[in-house]
Amino acid sequence: MAEKRKLFEEVGSDTPKHTPTGGMIDAANRGARGAIRIWLMVMFALVMVMIAVGGLTRLTDSGLSITEWKPITGALPPMDAATWEVEFDKYRQIPEYQLQNKGMSLSEFKAIYWWEWGHRQLGRVIGLVWALGFFGFLVARKIPTGWTSRLLILGALGGMQGAVGWWMVHSGLSGEMLDVASYRLATHLGLAFVILGLIAWYTYALSRPERDLMQARRSAEPKLFSLSTGLLHAAFLQIILGALVAGIDAGRNYPSWPLMEGGLWPSDMFALEPLWRNFFENPGLVQFMHRMLGYVLFAFGVVVWLRGRRSANRNTGFWFNAVFAMLCVQMGIGIATVVSAAAVHIAILHQIGAVLLWCLILRARFAARYPLPQSVRG
């Protein structure tokens, strides 16, 4: 007599079927997410240092000390007295020396030369770190699916940044320019922040498996994400205006707050002809725009913070609190920069503050798009 079978017993095979264990979404090619993330964090730190060194190069008027662009051979600095004299003689031919620094000694020239050489050398290091990492992961087939083009874009933008840097420097080597063109400086700094922002966003995304991110989007807060995107754009515009201020040394004019020249705005805001030049080259108008946008950015930041702190997700609320705290700090540093007539140590702190605020806004935006899971009780 055959043994009775259970009602739901599987028949036709004595071998139990393999049951999926989960993680099928990104099982095809997880790649070396952790290793790539570390590589991106190294590049993030290098770009952050690069922005700070670039700021100091501008504040010390060192950006025109090297008058040629030699991406390969320029990596070596002058090695002997004769080579130093050759480099110094090239500098003597440009307007900055003839109209502003005439009589500068060789030792004074070396001081500004090292700032610019260090800035360019750091750019080469960043390019090398990107190339070694990208092609290393590519050859080893460790790049996760869909990430090759994203990581390649970073290298392309880095190469473009080098070209923009030379385009910027070249503007100050002829005519009667004592510094680089302010709008070119703004382009150079703006592109640096774009690169930094992409690295930060990629680092955040690689911190969690792809399947977790897909699940997290179901709990996203679209309104908060949109508000943080708007705040990001406003902050970027303020960074560009800050570069225009630095480009024409406008931060050293009108060292008072909240008034300018005893009034709400300076009297010579539209003194240049044609009219459009004032928006790039008039210290009064450029600093006025930077101040006004600072107030708008702060007010908008308060609105975003009030919305963000009400998030049901505690982690998301934390990052929006961090954004508002950094916004307050940055506002205070900005005022200190104005009243100190852009003292170098305060001005560079203001630029570093912009980097921190930029990355915190990105982090809060990421949290609104991909909130961390939490229990019902929070």
Image (cartoon, grey):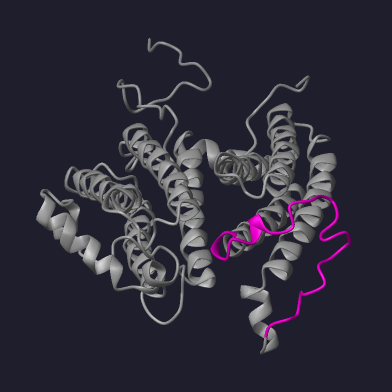
- Give x and y (percent) for residue 362: 60, 45
Above or below, 28 against 261 in this view is above
Q: Please report the bounds of the magenta region as a residue range.
A: 246-272
Q: Is residue 34 magenta?
A: no
Looking at the image, can residue 84 be seen? yes
Q: Main secondary structure of the magenta part?
A: loop
Q: Quadrant of residue 261?
A: bottom right
- Which residue is drawn at the image coordinates 39% and 26% (left, top)? 11
Asked whether 340 or 349 is in front, the reply is 340
Q: Is residue 268 magenta?
A: yes
Tell me: 265 left or right of 212.
right
- Give x and y (percent) for residue 150: 39, 55
Tell me: 158 left or right of 224.
left
- Which residue is drawn at the image coordinates 57% and 60% (left, top)? 243
Asked whether 354 or 364 is in front, the reply is 354
Q: Quadrant of the C terminus?
A: top right
Tell me: 184 left or right of 95.
right
Above or below, 265 against 343 in this view is below
